[in-house]
Each structure stands twice: as C-alpha cells, then as structure tokens.
Amino acid sequence: MIAITGANGNLGKATIQFLLQKVTPTNIVAIVRNPETVSSFKEQGVIVRQADYNDYNTLKQAFEDVEKVLQISTVGVDMEKAKQQEKNVVNAMAENNVKHIVYTSMVQAWPNPIFQGTETQYHTEELIKKTKIPYMFFRNSMYMEAIPELIGNALQTNEIRYPSGSGKVSFVSREDIAEAIANVLTENTHENQTYEITGHRAYTFDELAKLIRADMKHIDIADTIFKEELIGCQMPMEVVDLLVSMANGIKAGEFSFVDNTLGKLLGRTPSGLSEYVKNL
Ligand SMILES: NC(=O)c1ccc[n+]([C@@H]2O[C@H](COP(=O)([O-])OP(=O)(O)OC[C@H]3O[C@@H](n4cnc5c(N)ncnc54)[C@H](OP(=O)(O)O)[C@@H]3O)[C@@H](O)[C@H]2O)c1
C-alpha cells in the first residue's frame, strides 16, 4: 500500500487524485489529522487513517502494512517543534519497515538557509538518510499557487509590496508536482535520488508584476516596513518571522535555482507561469 501524510492538504489531495488513475483505491492510505475532512476519499474507496505528527503512537499505527510513503512536510512555524514532528514520522516509518520514502523538501536545501522552513526540511532529509530506507527527495521551489498570498492586494492596488530586491523565484505548479509524485510512487526507478523541482525559469518580482499586468509595479519595501505591516495584520510573531525569513531567502537567491527534472518526471513540458497568472 502507498500512504500519503498530510493527505487533506493541497498537495496531498492532488497527489491522491493522480494516484487514483494508476492504482486501485484500496492500495492508497490517506493519513490525516481529522478524518472528517476527507469523506470524499472514503467514498472513492481510499483507506483513511488518523494520525497527528505530534503523536508517535498514531503514526506507528497509521503506517502498518504500508510499503511506500509520501511524507508531506509539516507547516510548523516553531522550528524545534516542526523538527520533532518530522522525526516522529520518520521513526514511525522505520519502525514499520517501510520500503520507500518520498519526502517533500525545499529547493537547494542546505544546513544554513536564510528561510527557516528549509532548515527543518534539510534536517528531515538527514534523518531519512540515516534510516537507510530508500528515499526520494522532492526539493520543491515555490508554488505558483502561493503567488496570491505573496502579492497581497496587488490586484486591487497594482503594486506588489514585497522586500525581495532583485531575488528570483523559479515558481513551479503544485498540480505538476502532485502528478510527478504520483508517477514516481508507482515506478521503481527512483531510489536514493534528490530532485530539484522548479519551473523552467526564475522571475524577479519586477518581472512577476509585469507578467501579471503590464502596468503593475513591484515596490521593494524595507524588511522593517514589511514586518510592521504583517504585525498590523494581527499575525503571530513566529509567523511574521517565518515570512520575513522567506522574503530574505528570496532576496538572497534561495529560490532561484532552475532545473529540468520536473519535465522528465512528467514526460511533458511543465506548466508555465504566464499561463498561471492569466487566471489570477
Ligand atoms: N513550496 C512551496 O511554495 C510551499 C508552500 C507552502 C507549503 N509548502 C510545504 O509543502 C507542504 C505541502 O503543501 P500544501 O500546499 O499541501 O500545504 P497545506 O495545504 O497547508 O497542507 C499541509 C498538510 O499538513 C498537515 N499537517 C500539518 N500539521 C500536521 C500535524 N501536526 N499532523 C498531521 N498533519 C499535519 C495538514 O493537516 P491539517 O489539515 O489537519 O492541518 C495538511 O494536510 C506544506 O506542508 C509545507 O511544508 C511548500
């Protein structure tokens, strides 16, 4: 059986829809915190199991008789808590003698990133390697689908206020990632591979603004102003810090890497950013 953690999230749901085109539903295990959120999976015949990344025992039970797992990274903003959550998942997979792990990581993950989320994901990659279970890391660049949140109210104001300088992002379609993950989960040729999953080119926020609308502008605001604006939106301080670290990471080029692996995994040209922004 193939299990997917975070199965009710955007990437998990999309991956299961692609998997359903390739394997029988009873070979798919959707692992979620709250089974009520995935009643449609049950109707389609998918096995639903409950587990929380914070609760090792639930994870241990959820991976019983599972051969392959798609471990979807946590959204944790508290880095130490996030690392512990992911360690719980890795230990529970090892305890159940899972045969293959696909893990969603961050493009060009390394031990000392500026973007805090990458630190957790690199840490988890290392934990997975230590288990000696065959792995495949999907190091995803930023989703195109994250753009509406990144640009705030730019569609109304015609200005993207974001402190990314001239940093570039190799935006990639989350739907494409889901399709590629479903492909590798149903093939046996991807052992111990680290794939950088990116769009076919990277864009500065000036270029992104022009792509959305010819007269849209990118205003490269100061970090301090960005932070004040986020605090003004009543965001918890740890989320503010995470988002500032993301902008700083973009500015430093942490999301700019471009690679053609995604097209190879899909067997077709991946979706382009200009198509995506037409529907914003
Ligand atoms: N590359 C990018 O641009 C980008 C952007 C955003 C996120 N990400 C990363 O990629 C992952 C997948 O993206 P996505 O769009 O599918 O995110 P998403 O829609 O926010 O889904 C996250 C999933 O993680 C689950 N989860 C969170 N905490 C959990 C816990 N303690 N125990 C069990 N499940 C838990 C959520 O379950 P609940 O519904 O119960 O909360 C949800 O199913 C994210 O989790 C994040 O690490 C990457």
Image: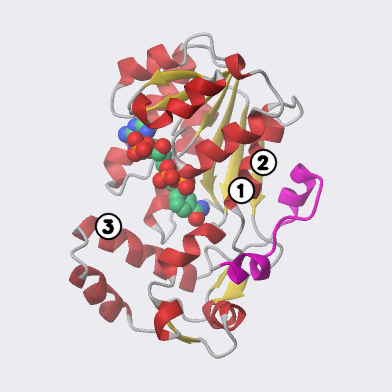
On whether residue 264 falls in the magenta region, the answer is: yes
On whether residue 53 falls in the magenta region, the answer is: no
Q: In the rendered structure, are the residues bearing label 2 and label 3 in contact, judged by CB atoms less than 8 Å apart?
A: no
**In this rendering, the label closer to the viewer, 3 or 1:** 1
Image x and y of residue 72, in percent: 48, 36
State the residue at coordinates (38%, 29%): 87
State the residue at coordinates (76%, 44%): 266
* Figure check: 45 above or below 259: above
Tell me if mark 3 has few (under 14), some (14-19) or many (20+) residues whose alpha carbon lies within 10 angstroms of its own. some
Which portion, as a residue range, is magenta? 259-279
The quarter in which the N terminus is drawn is top right
Q: Which residue is mark 1?
A: 175
Q: Which residue is mark 2?
A: 179
Quadrant hosting residue 151: bottom left
Ligand 1 rendered quadrant: top left
Q: In the rendered structure, are the residues bearing label 2 and label 1 in contact, judged by CB atoms less than 8 Å apart?
A: yes
